[in-house]
Amino acid sequence: MSVKVQAMGEYQTNCYIINVNNKDFIIDPGVESSSWIKQNVKNPVAILNTHGHFDHVWSNKQIQEYFNIKLYCPKNDAFMLKDDIFQRGMQTSVPDVLVKEDEELTIEGVKIKFHFFPGHTPGCSAIEIENNLFSGDFIFKGSIGRCDFPYSKPSDMRKSLEKVLSWNKDCKVFPGHGSSTTLEKEKTSLENWLNYI
């Protein structure tokens, strides 16, 4: 498996291209990401959204139509794609697949698990591929996603942090903003954040 990443737009939102067995999965095609994606994929098979905020889904429709591939989005965040709720001029998109809470999918022979970690958004998820966790805006290196936005819920974020801290495995974490880390390295930080929610 290989991982390509590029920070996109005003919010420097990480767009990822994951190649597994010569199949490319595009995670969170944000603002101004289309040209980079087109230059760096060879065999695109799916678009995966970690959550519905505009800076992560901005180029969904363009990439969806250009490559004629399916868009997968956590079902509880689909409403954010269909309406420009933050009024940023985003082109709306419609998911082909609404992913259920903690659902594991097999796409083109590749196992992909959407771990349900609400709080930042109602459907916020971290996508696991081969023990690599693409955490969106759930957890970052040294921090966590904000839960003071419209549709955020601090009590859900607390439960999500407790849930990930209960895992008895380590994995590499690729967040929606900033540099990569590991779950083991972030445990102390995540435990500390529980005191502030």
Image (cartoon, rainbow, N blue to C red):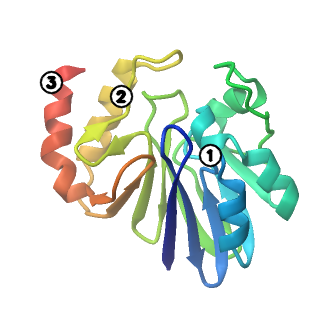
Q: Nearer the viewer, mark 1 or mark 2?
A: 1
Q: Amino acid at mark 1?
A: Gly
Q: Residue at x 77, y 29 (%)?
A: 82
How far apart are the two marked residues, 3 and 2, measured between alpha carbons? 12 Å
- Asked which secondary structure carries label 3, the reply is helix
Q: Amino acid at mark 2?
A: Met
Residue 113 lies left or right of residue 69; in this view the side is: left
Location of mark 2 (residue) = 157
Q: Residue at x 41, y 46 (%)?
A: 177
How far apart are the two marked residues, 1 and 2, measured between alpha carbons? 23 Å
Q: Position of residue 181 (x, y in %)?
A: 28, 59
Q: Position of residue 70 (x, y in %)?
A: 79, 56
- Asked which secondary structure carries label 2, the reply is helix
Of mark 1 and mark 2, the one earlier in the sequence is 1
Q: Which mark is residue 103?
A: none
Vertical order, 168 against 11 (above or below): below
Say if mark 1 contacts mark 2, CB within 8 Å: no
Closer to the camera in the image, 185 or 117 = 185
Of mark 3 and mark 2, the one earlier in the sequence is 2
Residue 76 lies left or right of residue 164; in this view the side is: right
Tell me where residue 20 sits by quadrant. Answer: bottom right
Q: Which mark is residue 30?
A: 1
Q: Amino acid at mark 3?
A: Asn
Q: Nearer the viewer, mark 1 or mark 3?
A: 1
Closer to the camera in the image, 146 or 12 = 12
Q: Residue at x 55, y 33 (%)?
A: 123
